[in-house]
Amino acid sequence: MSKREEKLDDIKKSVFSVRIARKELPEIGELVIGTVYRILEHGAYVLLDEYGGLEAYAPINEIVQSWFHDIKDYLRPGQKTVFRVIRVDARRRLIDISLRRVKEEEKKEKLARWKRTIRGVKLLELVAKRLNITLDRALQDFGWKLEDYYGDFLSIFENVVKYGPADLRKLGLSDNVINTIMEVAKERIEVEPVEISGIIRMINIKPDGVKHIRDVLLKAMELARKEGAESVKIYTIGPPRYRIDIMGRDPKKLEQVLKDVVNLVTTEIKRRGGEASFTRIGE
């Protein structure tokens, strides 16, 4: 195999061999991700990533801005960029595309979405491998259904890590599929910590009331850490008001921690002869 043939082979391998798009052919006006395959004097052949490497053609007048420019000033072999579909011959499966008719903001938005798609599809491919099925089968059996529900493939895994598998069960997936998606999500998704906050108003008019308040707040911090909060801060914003900030990576768990902390504070300060109330920040 010649170096040129090797390069073309490498370019082909950089494109998903499975069709990620629902339909077999793109529509006129659609923005598509394309990998430049071959550049000729009169235009360029491009492999459409979302359509399993379907070949499309970009005429030179749909690439260069003027005849004073060379096609290689705009495209290079192996480059992935955004094109607009301008002609579709469904019977002959011939697609013409344009580089010139894509606005810069459209290109940026499409590439950002494609970056998420690639990562999500690779995670779905890992799920398929562990289930001993093909990626194409996974897409048809549950992948596209999940994409409809979550918005994109990566969001499937991000939401599962944050909120658990309840929605997956609601969508009727088998336990085997659900457990595998959960397993892959926990292994590969790094969840950003979230913070929830509130204001505790607490008073105790006993002579040693300040000590009681301090003791209760220390107990509250201890409980939050014990229940899994990554970080907990309680500080005065002007007596008798105290702000509490709790940080963690599981929103549901964090809500329960806050609920338990507030319950402890109100119960404990009442037992000590005081009173407390709580106001959530951000709701």
Image: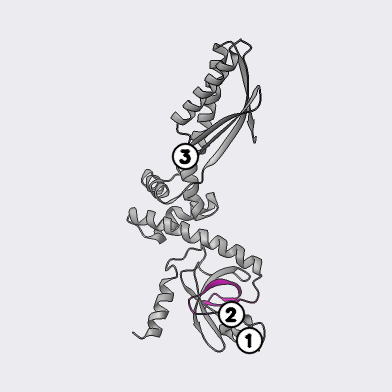
Quadrant hosting residue 86: bottom right
Disc 3 vs disc 1: which is toward the camera? 1
The answer to whether residue 225 is above or below residue 147 is: above
Question: Which secondary structure dominates the residues rendered in magenta?
Answer: strand
Which residue, given by chain and number where applicable, does mark 1 sit on?
A: 69
The answer to whether residue 232 is above or below residue 75 is: above
Quadrant hosting residue 133: bottom left
Disc 3 vs disc 2: which is toward the camera? 2
**Mark 1 or mark 2: whose residue is earlier in sequence:** 1
Write the start and end of the magenta stretch as one range.
76-100
**Mark 3 or mark 1: whose residue is earlier in sequence:** 1
The quarter of the image holding the C terminus is: top right
User: Callout 1: few (<14), some (14-19), or many (20+) C-alpha neighbours within 10 Å?
Assistant: few
Pointers 1 and 2 in contact (CB under 8 A)?
yes
Residue at x-position 58% and y-position 10%: 273
Marks 3/2: CA distance? 48 Å
Assign a secondary structure to mark 3.
helix
